[in-house]
Image: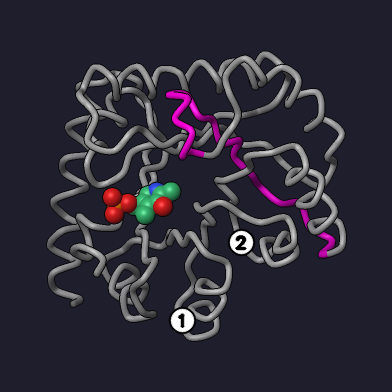
Amino acid sequence: MSDHVATMVAEVRERIAAARARGGHGQDVTLIAVTKTHGPDAVMAAANAGVHDVGENKVQEAESKMAQVTVPVRWHLIGHLQRNKAKNAAKFDLVHSLDSERLAVALDDAAGEAQRVLEVLVQVNVSGESTKSGFALHDLATVAARLHACSNLRVRGVMTMAPFDAEESVLRTVFRGARDARAQLQAAGFGADWLSMGMSGDYEVAVEEGATHVRLGTVLFGSRT
Ligand SMILES: *Cc1c(COP(=O)(O)O)cnc(C)c1O
């Protein structure tokens, strides 16, 4: 597995650099290797290839890998989180999927109990697809007011997912919507610089539109069975 992952990481990094130059936003881009459904060997292969940011969408699956992985990596929670699992989320380095006010309160409590500040991204649902989690853009002002009261959370930016297999114009609309959401959070006083957007099928467009974090599974590890 390791050789293949290293080859793919090198190719993806080149594509990211080219997309970044085309987009002209001048941002740094963090590559997150999404290891969901794969074993701890995928995490090790990513780390060996120089990728030290790992994304998981389920808390339990991630916890089992955390226990087995011996190299230091940063763990990103990218999937929808149930409130009753908020306590476990305090183990992650960054939670991308803050998608409700109630979850914000639960995460704030969990971080407080763990005596740490938890970094989070606000997930936005730009396209309005009912299958996707996240806040609508027009709710962000209200959300921001609520988040200011969560003293154990540090809001670092926005996460979004584009519709699968969408046309480029749709992708760009979604990614610009996320940028707009980030601007709203910044206007509300958060130092929210990060934009987590872009998956295997759309990360080059996402980087052109200013993504600072791309979440890549399939392109690095092959399809999930
Ligand atoms: C699975 C997943 C990814 C990675 O998707 P690929 O298409 O395999 O790159 C990215 N983001 C989230 C939220 C995911 O659940």
77 is higher (above) or lower (below) than 46? above
Mark 1 — residue? 69
Mark with earlier residue (1, 2): 1
Q: Can residue 216 be seen in this view?
A: no
Q: In the rendering, at what x and y percent does residue 197 appear?
A: 40, 36
- Amino acid type at mark 2: Phe
The residue stretch that appears in magenta: 114-132
Q: Does the residue labelled 1 lie within 8 Å of ligand 1?
A: no
- Say left or right for 219 vs 193: left
**Depth check: 160 or 119 in front?**
160
- Evaluate whether residue 119 shows in this view: yes
**Position of residue 122 in the picture relative to residue 31 (left or right):** right
Quarter of the image where one finds residue 84: bottom right
SS state under label 2: loop
State whether label 2 is within 8 Å of ligand 1.
Answer: no
**Main SS type for the magenta part?**
loop
Q: Residue at x 33, y 38 (%)?
A: 198
**Residue sitting at x 13%, y 51%:** 11
* Residue that appears at 21% across and 23% down: 168
- Residue, disc 2: 92
Check residue 3 in the rendering and tell me which mark sits there, or answer none: none
